[in-house]
Image (cartoon, rainbow, N blue to C red):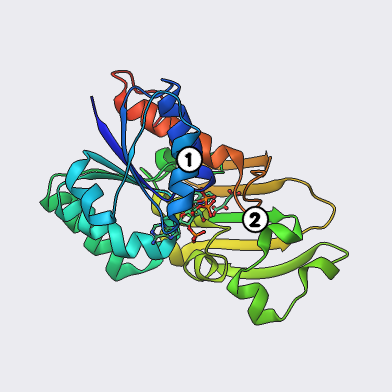
Amino acid sequence: MLKIGVIGCGFIGGQICRAIDKGVINAELYALSDSSKNKVLELTSSLKRYSPASMTIEELLKNVDFVIESASQKAVRLIVPQALEAGRDVMVMSVGALADEELRERLFRLAEQNNCKLYFPSGAVAGIDGINSASAAEISSVTLTTRKPPMGLAGAPQVEALGIKLETIEKETLLFEGPASEAVKAFPANVNVAATISLAGIGFERTKVRVIADPTLSKNVHEITVEGEFGKLSTRVENLPSPENPKTSYLAALSAISTLKKILSPVQIGT
Ligand SMILES: NC(=O)C1=CN([C@@H]2O[C@H](COP(=O)(O)OP(=O)(O)OC[C@H]3O[C@@H](n4cnc5c(N)ncnc54)[C@H](OP(=O)(O)O)[C@@H]3O)[C@@H](O)[C@H]2O)C=CC1
Ligand SMILES: O=C([O-])CC(=O)C(=O)O
């Protein structure tokens, strides 16, 4: 059975571990790692079937077959090259780190050289399947518009750079408009989806992103519009935010769980 190691035991990591523990994913939950040991202990004590070991990153990479990064963009830079060099397949949630061209090319090269797979789940958006299909021909434009309740954007470098007090926002306010390459740096914990869309479609410079704080919302709303030789595609998802981490939508965790199920299944549905 595939031995899984999870790095980052917050909302998404926790949901993945519970899905493995319940048998929704047919794999062995072997090891956990987090910058906070307490998070590992809390998560382990909530599990019934598995009792994964708490490991350092180095120990975890030696002992598992499959690594899940559900931590941060910084963690991707530190961990994913090592994981690929150790010959491990990796699922990456903090996809925004791949806006760095040097890192992106290095990761793709390491995956090829070491015969490993890198997986990027669709996350909190719908339509990655359609963008993948459309990219087999010419795509002329891709736009992501993300709307979140103001406090779901707390801590973002762009909010700090603008000097905006999120709790005082009274109407829909545009906080960012620009390429995905800048969006993922301005909002590293809010628009990783922009990176996944860029990888599937026309890259980080041509993918346009708008981030809006909307005090009338209780959901995280992502809208994608794509135009190309295939025609036009529009998707809109109204996501329930995680109660533990309002920046993250529940669907992002479900997409990670579904990706793992797909990897382990003999039947593959969708592009
Ligand atoms: N692809 C997508 O569609 C989506 C991606 N995301 C991204 O996925 C990641 C996980 O999201 P979520 O579970 O909600 O986040 P959480 O903040 O709930 O959990 C992340 C956990 O990882 C820990 N962590 C951070 N850096 C490291 C590191 N270098 N080594 C070990 N542990 C680390 C954090 O610790 P501490 O709190 O101490 O930093 C925290 O416990 C985030 O980067 C998020 O932005 C989220 C939603 C959608
Ligand atoms: O969960 C979401 O709504 C999207 C998100 O935070 C991200 O892409 O980083």
> Which residue in the protein does label 2 denote?
145
Q: Position of residue 46 (x, y in %)?
A: 50, 33
Ligand 2 within 8 Å, label 2 CB? no
Q: Amino acid at mark 1?
A: Leu
Ligand 1 within 8 Å, label 1 CB? no
Tell me the CA gap for discs 2 and 1. Answer: 34 Å
> Which residue in the protein does label 1 denote?
43
Tell me the quarter of the picture where residue 134 sits.
top left
How many neighbours does mark 1 have within 10 angstroms: few (below 14), some (14-19), or many (20 or more)? some
Q: What element does badge 1 sit on?
A: helix
Determine whether, in the image, residue 225 is placed left or right of residue 51: right
Quarter placement of the N terminus: top left
Determine whether, in the image, residue 185 is placed left or right of residue 163: left
How many neighbours does mark 2 have within 10 angstroms: few (below 14), some (14-19), or many (20 or more)? some
Quarter placement of the C terminus: top left
**Which callout, 2 or 1, points at the residue further toward the start of the chain?**
1
Q: Nearer the viewer, residue 59 or 141?
A: 59
Residue 230 visible, this orientation: no
Question: What residue lies at 78% left-to-right and 74% top-to-bottom?
Answer: 165
Question: What residue lies at 43% left-to-right and 34% top-to-bottom?
Answer: 17
Q: Is residue 116 above or below residue 108?
A: above
Tell me the quarter of the picture where residue 213 sits.
bottom right
Q: Amino acid at mark 2?
A: Thr
Q: Is residue 158 above or below residue 235?
A: below
Q: Position of residue 198 (x, y in %)?
A: 44, 56
Q: Position of residue 197 (x, y in %)?
A: 47, 51
Which of label 2 and label 1 is nearer to you? Answer: 1
Determine whether, in the image, residue 211 is placed left or right of residue 259: right
